[in-house]
Amino acid sequence: MRLPLLVSLLTFAFVATPVSARQTPSTLTVPPSGVLGVGEAQLTPAFWIGLQAQPDRVILDSAAIAAQNAKLMQRDPSMHDLRALPTTLDRPRVTGWIKSLSTLPTHPLYDVNGKPVPASALQAIAANAALDAIPAQQETRYGLVVRRAALRGFPTTLRVFSSDDDTDIDRFQETAEFPGTPVVIAHTSADGKWLFVVSPRYAAWTGKENVAEGSAAQVFGYADKKPYRVVTGASVHTVFTREQPALSQLQLDMGTRVPLLTDLPPDQPVNGQTPYTSHVLQLPLRDADGKLQFAPALLQKNTDTAADYLPLTRANLIRQAFKFLGERYGWGHAYDGRDCSGFVSDVYRSMGVQMPRNTSKQAISPALTHRVFADKDNRQDRIAAAYALQTGDLVYIPGHVMMVLGQFNGQPYVIHDVGGMSYRKADGSRARIKLNAVSVTPLLPLLFNDKQTFVDRMTSIVRIRP
């Protein structure tokens, strides 16, 4: 598929690797796991950091990252600048948001038991969107996400699948948003249980219990508040508390920024516990009327957080990616995990870099620098580009993205959140390995189908660089 011409092109420097130094897929060692070319050493971040010439050199400083994020918000149509929205929303805008997402597929859908979902049930779900109830004009309403919230294609918890033997890829699951994310509340479902919300990087349905409504000043004031902590682990959880059940053991995922409360007496308990061993966070709460309140919660000081976003370096990219190693693949951030595009965006978000949510948008974003591939690009050009990849580069094929770790034994390696891998064995037969997790693999041997490799199907390479 030809990509839009609006993306900027980047010529990647290619330093030829001697053919003798490059291992062919058939010469890579196949360990008991079946994941060729990957032993225990390659499953540690230290291994890949040790291959870097300047692992701690800062790629973009905080000012450059802020400029990059501003460009993304201005130029990328998949992003939403909530602060720039008008004070009133008209029906065409809201209807357009919902219709661009909530379109029933024409192919059959199946439930978790492998049974066909009746057309009548699907029509009822679509009707729950209540498009006819969207007013001609409405005041723009704001809110904060109060817990890890699933964002859905339709206002329903029904999980649906494209085949009767698949229970992983729920076609109504879109993504997730995290506590403290600002949203615009655009519409309510007919049954009153769902809100259609617009976050900075997505617009979808979420359960009303996931959002607390407040004023624009409250919402954006919270988003801008300092000082704060940034979650740098795969996820952390607040301390258990009976006093504030909604904030007890609350999950906070990588890249989440949470303000600190600094005006509480340090010798006084918070939620029944001393705060001196913990960070005192300020978190949003939804009251009985759905309105926004704030309350303190404790986060142990020994959890994986930082006082600011991490420096964008090759070493940090590798370390952050490996914190997800082995995490179960979660389509649309399901299973308290993430999918391929969620994985790379959460890694970069821990360093302050914002990205569109989905691979289809990341791969063509006019705010990101690309090397774009089209049908005219021959295999030799693609292989040359693969050998010119640098640590942190993002490699896109249809429906998938991988992050480059570096080169080892003449092979470019990637880390990605992937369902499985296929490669050609020495005897010409095809090996198929189910992964379904964040995994390390070599790039070149990966097969897209019986005739094409991943490299043959590359659509774009994104490089986050000056």
Image (cartoon, rainbow, N blue to C red):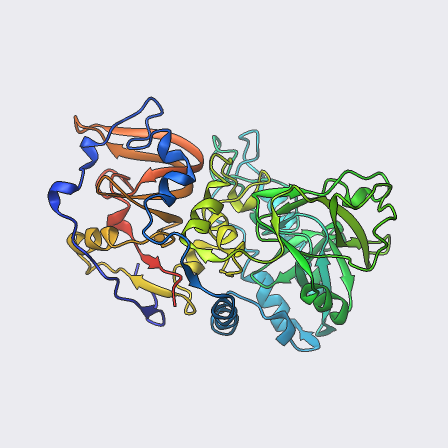
Q: Foreground: 289 or 170?
A: 289
The answer to whether any part of residue 418 appears in the image is no
Q: Quadrant of residue 90?
A: bottom right
Q: Quadrant of residue 290?
A: bottom right
Residue drawn where x is 24% and y is 49% of the image: 456
Percent position of residue 254, x then y = 57, 48
Q: Is residue 143 left or right of residue 452?
A: right
Residue 160, placed above or below residue 179: above
Q: Quadrant of residue 243?
A: top right
Residue drawn where x is 26% and y is 34% of the image: 423
- Name the quadrant of the C terminus: bottom left
The answer to whether any part of residue 82 appears in the image is yes
Residue drawn where x is 18% and y is 37% of the image: 24
Q: Is residue 374 left or right of residue 302?
A: left
Number of numbered callouts drawn? 0
Percent position of residue 330, x then y = 52, 40
Pick out the residue farthest to the top. 32
- Name the quadrant of the N terminus: bottom left
Residue drawn where x is 34% and y is 64% of the image: 370
Percent position of residue 117, x then y = 57, 38
Q: Is residue 294 left or right of residue 166?
A: right
Q: Foreground: 12 or 446?
A: 12
Percent position of residue 188, x then y = 72, 59
